[in-house]
Amino acid sequence: MLEGNRRLTLRVVELFPEDALFHFTPAPPLRPFADMVNEILEMEEGYVRGIATREWTFSPKRVVKTKQELLEACAAVRRRTLELWPRITAARLTEEEIDPFFGSEPQSNLSRLVYTLENEIHHRGQGYTYLRILGIQPPAFYIR
């Protein structure tokens, strides 16, 4: 499920014209889609690393200036996720902890990962809207 969602998000990134990816917003305070993708990557990096290793550090915001650099960052984060994934046990997913980044009530690590996926879906939906405003047909949702 994570892989199919990410492929769809990458298809949205690929459809953006380079300048619009980094600069277009339909209205303040909305952010450019590249900023949203960076947030998706930061959450994935921080949560997967924390769940797998118990090292709860939030990566500094990466600076990417081109669509190619953003796509490469997406690939690098996913490679790291796939390296760490075998260390995440079912027992670890059910453990509840206070969120180290947002300080919310204790939640299971599975809930944390589901939230991360929902965040990606939410921002991808914004990307779809941005593409439509730019006159670009977004990718078919059902092709993963």
Image (cartoon, rainbow, N blue to C red):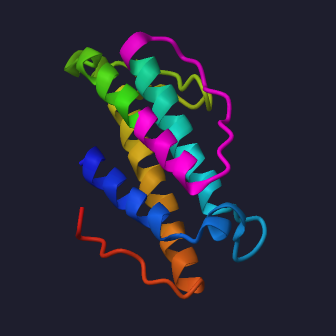
Query: How many marks on residues?
Result: 0
Left/right of residue 28 with respect to residue 5 in the rendered view: right
Q: Give the x, y percent position of residue 100.
A: 58, 22
Left/right of residue 128 with respect to residue 86 in the rendered view: right
Instruction: Say whether residue 88 is magenta.
Output: no
Compare residues 137 and 87 and report the one nearer the observer. 137
Residue at image x 33%, y 32%? 110
Compare residues 49 and 72 and report the one nearer the observer. 72
Residue at image x 36%, y 74%? 139
Is the residue 75 above or below the residue 124 in the image?
above
Q: Give the range drawn in magenta.
A: 52-77
Residue 8 lies in quadrant: bottom left
Residue at image x 68%, y 50%? 65
Q: Give the x, y percent position of residue 79.
A: 36, 31
Q: Give the x, y percent position of residue 69.
A: 56, 46
Left/right of residue 99 with respect to residue 29 in the rendered view: left
Compare residues 42 and 105 and report the one nearer the observer. 42
Q: Give the x, y percent position of residue 89.
A: 23, 17
Farthest residue toward the bottom?
135
Is the residue 101 above or below the residue 129 in the image?
above
Residue at image x 45%, y 52%? 120
Instruction: Say whether residue 65 is magenta.
Output: yes
Q: In which quarter of the image is the C terminus?
A: bottom left
Farthest residue toward the right?
28
Compare residues 68 and 135 and report the one nearer the observer. 68
Is the residue 24 above or below the residue 62 in the image?
below
